[in-house]
Amino acid sequence: MVSAVSSITSMIDRPAAVAAAPAFGVQPGGVGVTGVTQTSFTDMMAQMATSAVDTLKAGEAASIAGIQGRASVQQVVEAVMSAEQTLQTAIAIRDKVVAAYQEIARMAI
């Protein structure tokens, strides 16, 4: 069930032209002018999506382990609550992205 969500990270790949273009204030090696490594928004979102999928898989695995009697009720509840919080966060981010897209679509050209 959760494995279908893991394909999200494959859809986030950037085109080669965008990946090769340095961001403002960032040198081609990915290190900024101040020497601090910069990460792109796409990379950050990909990491968050991967982390969310891992959390949801852990919650699902804990639920199955609880049904089989291999996990305590407390462990199952903690894992499911963490998965629920992660899912609510992902839904909130999705809603904000859709709202931003709709706002852009309404702009006069």
Image (spheres, grey):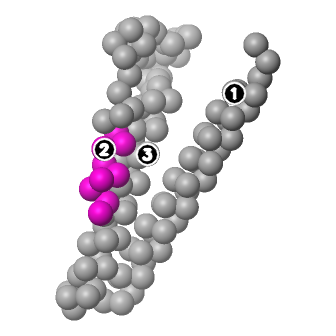
Classed neighbour count for the residue bearing mark 1: other residues with Cα under 10 Å, few (<14), some (14–19), many (≥20)? few
Which residue occupies 55% across, 55% down? 91
- Specify start and end residues of the magenta stretch as a single range: 1-9
Asked which secondary structure carries label 1, the reply is helix
Of the two numbered discs 2 and 1 in the rendering, the one whose residue sits closer to the viewer: 1
Classed neighbour count for the residue bearing mark 2: other residues with Cα under 10 Å, few (<14), some (14–19), many (≥20)? few
Asked which secondary structure carries label 2, the reply is helix
1 displayed left or right of 26: left
The disc placed on residue 7 is 2
List x then y, in percent, for residue 33: 52, 11
Q: Which residue is mark 3?
A: 48
Q: Is residue 88 visible?
A: yes
- The answer to which of 90 and 33 lies nearer the viewer is 90
List x then y, in percent, for residue 6: 31, 49
Which residue occupies 27% across, 56% down? 3
The Cα atoms of the two marked residues, 3 and 1, are separated by 26 Å
Residue 43 lies, with reference to residue 79, above or below; the image says above
The Cα atoms of the two marked residues, 3 and 2, are separated by 13 Å
